[in-house]
Amino acid sequence: MVLVGLIPLMTTSCSDEDDEHYLTVNGTNAAEHTFPGMFANGKSGIDYKQVFKIKSDVQWSLNGKVNWLNVSATSGKGEVDLTIYPSSENNSESERKVTLMLSGGDISVSIDIIQEAGKPVCHVSPVNEVALHDRICWEYEATSNVNDFQWFLLSQNSRDRLTEKEILELISAEEKLKYKDGYISFTPYDSEGYGIEENSVYYLVTLAYDIEGIAGELKYTRIETPPYYDGDVDAYVSFYNFEVATFGFSFDVYKEGYCDTYHLIYGGQDEILDPAIYAFQINYYLKHNKKHWFSENWGLEIVTNYPNEHKFTYTSIDMLYRTYCIAYGWGVFKNGELSSDLIGFQNLINEEEYDEEYIVQRSRNNEVSTGAFIIDRSKEEMKANKLRK
């Protein structure tokens, strides 16, 4: 709210002999009224203007102007329309206030302006996106006022074909997800159920709601999938000589095709996740040069930039509580470009004996049907911590 109070600090006498000097606002003596207004929700621009009709027989000047406030005149005499509006939004959590002073002759009038605290536009945006040739993975960031949200993935064709109204109707029909920090999502399908295509453009669309259920800003995030490199033209790794024991396992890794270096993630898991999740984990480490909560809570190991063949060993008491052994490698070309694919193995560990057979699989040929998915960080951390007790 904007409060505009006009209070004469010093005026001439109101006697017949001395009332020849005057300064009025909107036709009213300033001593008798205040003039309310509204700069709603910290907004800015001339649409939120307040106009005050000033009449005076003295030359007046205005002092106290601040940089977030626009005034149409800083001096005047006679009849002047004084237009005031905020020139910038107030995005803080507190209101801001300024007192303008109109002074002329021996008359002074104060005008108190208050711009309300800005309420940030409610939105959720994908960040740290990782695109393989056939699936996409990402996490989220959100404004502090988000309660829940919806998302889906649009192909370029759908984005061009649908109107904004149609997109809003489609996303509004999606399931609402209670927002929590640390959500990770992935999908191998677009919103129409078609598989993610290589070398294509997609748009992650998100819509957030505040605690009162009021929808915020519709967000579009453009993501481009890489081309698929098949066979020997790819940069990838192979896994050999797999061995497993009670408290761990070991394996050899060899570069294949045009692989110059590679990044590897491996360890024990109580469930198998989509390859995009492992790509996200590796990519997060590369970007931030620190462990993500995946590795901290799931007991995964990440090694990077290994130029030669290596034998890796994973030993941990956690293997007693794990259902699978996993390892995935992400090849790197000589120019630093990452492969469009992850190749890896996953081994089921039976209660009585270990299944020593393993499958080297490329995600392009993975026949496991996996739909759109979202990981709740807090639940995964709780589950991981419980295993360690």
Image: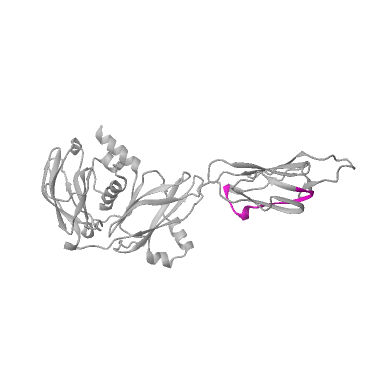
Q: Quadrant of the N terminus?
A: top right
**What coloring was used for the rendering?**
one colour
Give the residue furthest to the right.
16
Is the residue 226 above or below the residue 290 in the image?
A: below
Q: Nearer the viewer, residue 43 or 133?
A: 43
User: In the image, what residue occupies the spot 86% across and 44% down?
Assistant: 19
Q: Is residue 337 left or right of residue 96?
A: left
- Quarter of the rendering containing residue 270: top left
- Quarter of the rendering containing residue 224: bottom left
Give the residue furthest to the top.
389
> Where is residue 306 drawn, in percent x and y?
18, 49
> Where is residue 245 drawn, in percent x and y?
11, 40
User: In the image, what residue occupies the spot 24% across and 40% down?
Assistant: 299
Is the residue 28 above or below the residue 247 in the image?
A: below
Q: Which residues are magenta?
A: 42-59
Q: How many marks?
A: 0
Q: Is residue 79 magenta?
A: no
Q: Is residue 70 left or right of residue 183?
A: right
Is the residue 225 above or below the residue 128 in the image?
A: below
Q: Quadrant of the C terminus?
A: top left
User: In the image, what residue occupies the spot 64% across and 46% down?
Assistant: 65
